[in-house]
């Protein structure tokens, strides 16, 4: 089987408008597939930056394929059988904040970012007394999101005061 990457398959380019915490199957096969459809069928024109939520994750594998993958949709649509294979190309890049914290924090300064997506459950949205604002990155999802939002607001205020 031929490797899947930008050399073997075309990949669209769109502005990074979405930060997605999580690189698992549900987000990629459901949420990112919907974004791919919105790009195809409307002028949504967005790409996704994936942020690995835990220290041991899958961004290395995802980046190894230039963030390309397939979704196989099977079932029934309008009473007819469906079996289609779609190459999803909406993820622009995948970041590991544990080894790429500066790139993760730089997302706060990207002017096109409009949405943050996560499928973190209530188990992941809990207070962790060991999670500190000064950690790079914070160990919890709420901590990482707080750091990112604080960085964005801090930069915006700084720019407003300069200008």
Image (cartoon, grey):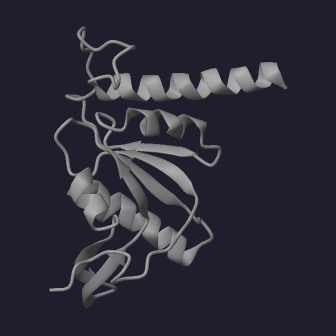
Quadrant showing the N terminus: bottom left
Q: Relative to the observer, which residue lies in front, 83 or 71? A: 71
Residue 27 location in percent, x, y?
A: 30, 55
Quadrant showing the C terminus: top right
Number of marks present in the image shown? 0
The residue at the point 36 percent across, 80 percent down is: 7
Residue 8 location in percent, x, y?
A: 33, 84
Residue 95 location in percent, x, y?
A: 35, 46
Name the side, left or right, on which 117 lies relative to 74: right
Compared with 119, 98 (above or below) is above
Q: Relative to the observer, which residue lies in front, 127 or 94? A: 94
The residue at the point 35 percent across, 23 percent down is: 136
Q: Is residue 24 in view?
A: no
The residue at the point 28 percent across, 64 percent down is: 29
Q: Is residue 41 in view?
A: yes
Q: Relative to the observer, which residue lies in front, 101 or 79? A: 101
Question: Residue furthest toward the bottom?
Answer: 80
The residue at the point 32 percent across, 22 percent down is: 138
Give the quarter of the image for residue 156: top right
Give the quarter of the image for residue 117: top left
Compared with 159, 69 (above or below) is below
Question: Residue furthest toward the right?
Answer: 163
Give the quarter of the image for residue 147: top left
Question: Residue furthest toward the top?
Answer: 129
Residue 151 location in percent, x, y?
A: 54, 25
């Amino acid at each position: 089987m031929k490797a899947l990457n930008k050399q073997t398959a075309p990949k669209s380019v769109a502005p990074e408008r979405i930060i997605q915490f999580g690189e698992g199957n549900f987000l990629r096969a459901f949420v990112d597939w919907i974004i791919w459809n919105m790009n195809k069928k409307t002028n949504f024109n967005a790409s996704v930056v994936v942020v690995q939520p835990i220290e041991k994750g899958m961004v290395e594998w995802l980046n190894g394929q230039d963030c390309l993958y397939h979704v196989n949709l099977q079932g029934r649509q309008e009473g007819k059988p469906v079996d289609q294979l779609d190459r999803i190309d909406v993820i622009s890049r995948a970041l590991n904040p544990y080894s790429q914290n500066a790139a993760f924090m730089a997302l706060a300064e990207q002017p096109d970012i409009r949405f943050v997506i996560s499928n973190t459950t209530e188990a992941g949205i809990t207070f962790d007394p060991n999670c500190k604002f000064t950690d790079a990155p914070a160990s919890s999802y709420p901590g990482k999101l707080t750091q990112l939002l604080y960085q964005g607001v801090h930069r915006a205020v700084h720019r407003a005061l300069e200008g």
